[in-house]
Amino acid sequence: MVCISNIPAKNIILCFLIYFSFLSSAHAYNITIDKIIDIELKKKHDKKTVYRFKEWRKLINKSKELPAINKVKLVNNFFNNKNIVEYAEDIYIWGQLDYWATPIEFVFKAYGDCEDYAIAKYYTLLAMGIKDNDLRVTYVKFKTYQYGINKDLAHMVLSFYPPRESTPLVLDNVNKKLIPATKRDDIKFIYSFNGTKLWVAKSRKYGVYVGTSRKLGKWAKLIAKIRLN
């Protein structure tokens, strides 16, 4: 996906449905994430790559007993740290206009775009014990001003819904502050989803449940790739 750029609405919907099928395997991936990191650490990587994987594993292992909000803050800061990963468009990383990387691929490459950040934060928080129902990967319209024109650009963030609260906190790679969605006047929620559910946004707080991912299988190859890692 090309983040913070102009994308027709029908293409956003198509990308959304395809990508949501990938997230149907969230729990399967969560079960093996620590083992996959250990496998990567046994490979002959350069020192910087080994450092990133070790820091990632350390983050997961040391944070499992912390309160949920502390986990969310740590994960957001970790992936927004340029010493771990940096923003780059898919064409420069993968030679493709639109590529969804697994969290392992993202950390290995050390570069990714908005959905790569959202994916990695999502799966890492699952591995740390955050409930899937408290997380939603969220497509938004990002309001910006370019060349004298106001634009609404496609972007992806991760939303965390604290227990007993209806307003989510936004984990973003553009605005790196962890703040409530109601204070993000620069974004408009379009869709949100997690491993099993899909919502159409009605506001920054609420969404209307519109279905599950059970019948979406377009990303079977990507799921298989994750399981083979």
Image (tube, rainbow, N blue to C red):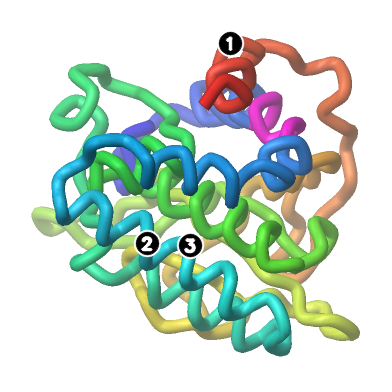
Residue 158 in view here? yes
Frontmost residue, 20 versus 28: 28
Q: Is residue 36 above or below residue 188?
A: above
Q: Nearer the viewer, mark 3 or mark 1?
A: 3
SS at mark 1?
helix
Which residue appears at 47% of the width and 70% of the height? 58
Q: Residues within 10 Å of mark 2 (few under 14, many from 20)?
A: some
- The residue type indicated by label 1 comes to Lys
- The residue type indicated by label 2 comes to Lys
Q: Are marks 2 and 3 in contact (CB under 8 Å)?
A: yes
| The quarter of the displayed image where residue 158 is located | bottom right
Q: Is residue 13 above or below residue 83?
A: above
Give residue 24's position: percent from left, percent from top.
76, 32
Which residue appears at 69% of the width and 49% of the height? 192
Which residue appears at 22% of the width and 40% of the height? 45
Q: CA distance from mark 3 to mark 1?
A: 26 Å
Residue under label 1:
221
SS at mark 3?
helix
Find residue 54 and name its label. 2
Residue under label 3:
57
Horizontal side of 194 relative to 32 (left or right) equals: right
